[in-house]
Amino acid sequence: MTSFQPSFNLDVRQEASLDDFDAQNYTSIIQAVDKLCLGQLSELYIFGEKYVGKTHLALSIYNAYITQQKNAISLSLIDLIDDDDVDALNNLEMFDLIILDDIQAINNNYVWQEAMFHLINRIREQHKQLVFLADTPARELDIALLDLVTRLSLAPMIKLPSSTLESDRATLLRAILRRKSWRLPDSIFEYLVKEGPHTAGEIIEVLDSISPLLTHLTRPQVPKKTIEEAKAIIQRKTVLLEISRYTADTDQ
């Protein structure tokens, strides 16, 4: 049974956490990140399909790392390239850890590939740490600068699972709820697992949408009408997230 707390405030803008990935199929990733935070791993390359939670994971790694009294920075190459500021890669070696999300954004862009090549060299010379996140393995990126492909390929590589199984999503949702000390009625929990999104970040967005319905209820028994309204919001929000993905893909 999934117990329900009748009066709760959901602050879904709280920082992402590695606890959001507390599921068996994420074990290898969490173990690698633990080694990274302990200084036992200098680089890590994480890849996975679009919309499996890479950006949420990047923020979770950042938050875990800075608790070690070290400094870090997390950047999306899509955002940097959109700003057309290749100089943004200069001097990043001042940080202990540099997290670079959306590596695939440098496909077919030699200027940024060259800048990335020099950045990796500087970081290694300074004995700092690197995390790369991308849609594909390094060897499958469309990069003309072969020396850069070689450097990216030297990092230990792990695939981020897609959470296509309902059991995996249930484990992921339980981890999020446990970390936040949130509780849901069983029927809403089950509906969210079956009909909701698959990634931690999007699950939290959906929780944000339904939280007003479930906050400060005056009785422990959730009215059927409220449950049906929550399910409708979950369905609508999930569709909107899917549409935003499609729009982002067509704009690229």
Image: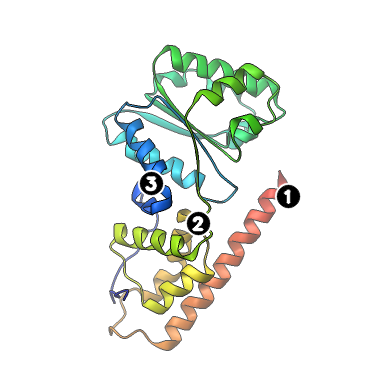
Which of marks 1 and 2 precedes in the sequence?
A: 2
Mark in the foreground, 2 or 1? 2
Which of marks 3 and 1 precedes in the sequence?
A: 3
Q: Residue at x 29, y 69 (%)?
A: 8
Q: Quadrant of the C terminus?
A: top right
Which x, y percent locates residue 222? Answer: 35, 84
Camera-side residue: 100 or 28? 28
Q: Residue at x 44, y 74 (%)?
A: 190
Name the residue beneath numbered marker 1.
250
| Residue 88 in view | no
Q: Residue at x 72, y 28 (%)?
A: 108
Q: Quadrant of the N terminus?
A: bottom left
Callout 3 crowding tier (Cα within 10 Å): few <14, some 14–19, many ≥20: few
Residue 184: quarter of image: bottom left
Which x, y percent locates residue 26? Answer: 42, 48
Q: Residue furthest bottom?
A: 224
Which of marks 2 and 3 precedes in the sequence?
A: 3
Camera-side residue: 129 or 221? 129
Q: Which mark is residue 27?
A: 3
Look at label 2 and name its amino acid. Answer: Ser
Q: Is residue 60 left or right of residue 247?
A: left
Look at label 1 and name its amino acid. Answer: Thr
C-alpha separation, residue under disc 1 versus residue under disc 3: 34 Å
Name the residue beneath numbered marker 2.
163
Q: Residue furthest top?
A: 125
Camera-side residue: 21 or 83? 21
Secondary structure type for disc 3: helix
Look at label 3 and name its amino acid. Answer: Thr
Q: Disc 1 vs disc 3: Cβ atoms closer than 8 Å? A: no
Q: Is residue 149 left or right of residue 18?
A: right
Q: Residue at x 60, y 30 (%)?
A: 138
